[in-house]
Amino acid sequence: MLRLRTVIFYFSLLLCFLKSSGKAQEYFDYQAATPCDLRVIEAMMLYFSTEFGNPSAPHAFGERAVTALSEARQKIARLLGGKAANWIFTSGATEANVLAICGVMRAAPQCKNHIIVCATEHKSILETCRSLTQQGYTLTVLPVDREGRLSLDLLKKSFRPETMLVSIMAANNEIGVIHPVAQIADICRKRGVLFHTDATQAIGLIPFSVSLIGADLVSFSGHKIYGPKGIGALYVASHVKIAPLLFGGGQERGLRAGTEPVALCVGLAKALEIAEALRSQEGRRLARLQSLFLRRLQMLKGWRLNGSLQERLPNNVNISIEGVDREDLLPALPDFALSTGSACTSEAHFSHVLAALDPEDTSPPAALRISFGRGTTGASVRHLADRLIEVVQRLRATKPAAGKRACKTKKTEVRI
Ligand code: PMP
């Protein structure tokens, strides 16, 4: 029976593959989304089909759904630390972040109304905090240096008697800069302030454990770790008082009403298990690809790496290139799935992260975010680097006026 199901599963996958009409592009946008691992899809299939029961239902279907949910939760706790009951399933990292910030602040005493975040946080943190300021809460947004790093001294000086929560991401989604979250957690603990970290980009790539770090709240998401979209989780330590955002059901310890998407929860746990098993080997491989790309790009002049090279995720490269217009760059590279990062305020794709690295620069050069993943090979990295050099040289030759936008910072020192 199981064999037959596996055969049908792979046959349907083959059909999907044949039907897909996507334009063949080499994929370099793993920080935006990763493909769902086939083992994850396989693990979820059962809960989309025969085991479709509602975990709140009072019969055997419901009981089996409860068992699947509880096994998924236990797996997450085993891999990332904390107790299983401390992990709350959400629809993704956005919801986890909003629940962490709003939930903690709503449950806090009135006099504890101050939040500290960093300027390069994900918008789900920044905009949530800004919306809270309209309800009387106060907010400190810490600047970063040119390399995207936070000053711990500045953090220490920003605490007030009314500070309730600090939220600093573990690693940045645009420039890959890793923050020293264990040190930050320690600073917060000594002051009796709660610490939340958005670990969406870090989990599965660098070692991460809520217990070792000592964070009070942690968010992450399925679709960054080769799991499904629409699922994530928030760790809430037992001592944290938090108010729910969704009402109308007692699910997730009363913190997140709504029928649990059992298949997605199973998929999240399976994706995490695979990502953790591969992490150190894959991390080293990605770091080699990152070095290879940066080394290859040394053949081009007039570009800079955005964000620190040393404190950086192994899968991220973010570069600004002088002498080309950002609106010309992506269309000239149609064979690659890439992401831009622009800090120019007139652009729809405004990057608050790049703007935070150099707030004075009102006319920054074109920027590209390139992110590597399991499907990236040395050959694909060399192909991208060579095409990029060629395209930039051609664009510079045809539109020399664009050279006005120069890269301001130092030459990139590449680790080989
Ligand atoms: N935080 C970070 C750092 C992210 O990179 C993302 C996704 N871009 C999110 C939060 C939001 O995650 P989700 O798409 O699961 O809501």
Image (cartoon, helix red, strand yellow):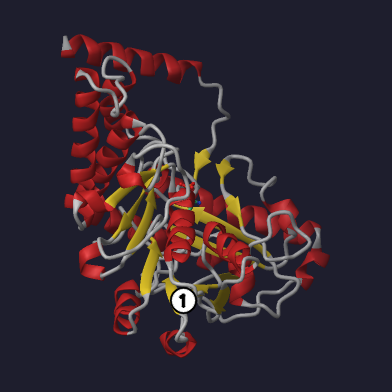
Q: Quadrant of the C terminus?
A: bottom left
User: Disc 1 marks which residue?
Assistant: 112
Question: Observer-nearest residue: 240 or 328?
Answer: 240
Q: Residues within 10 Å of mark 1 (few under 14, many from 20)?
A: some
Residue lying farthest to the right in this orientation = 401
Residue 372, position in %: x, y?
42, 51
151 up-or-down from 4: above or below: below
Residue 248, position in %: x, y?
44, 37
Q: Is residue 353 visible?
A: yes
Q: Is residue 281 visible?
A: no
41 up-or-down from 304: above or below: above
Residue 279, position in %: x, y?
25, 53
Residue 379 shown left or right of residue 349 in the figure? left
Image-quadrant location for residue 348 = bottom right
Numbered disc 1: secondary structure: loop
Please report the residue visible at 48 percent of the width from the left and 62 percent of the height from the top: 106
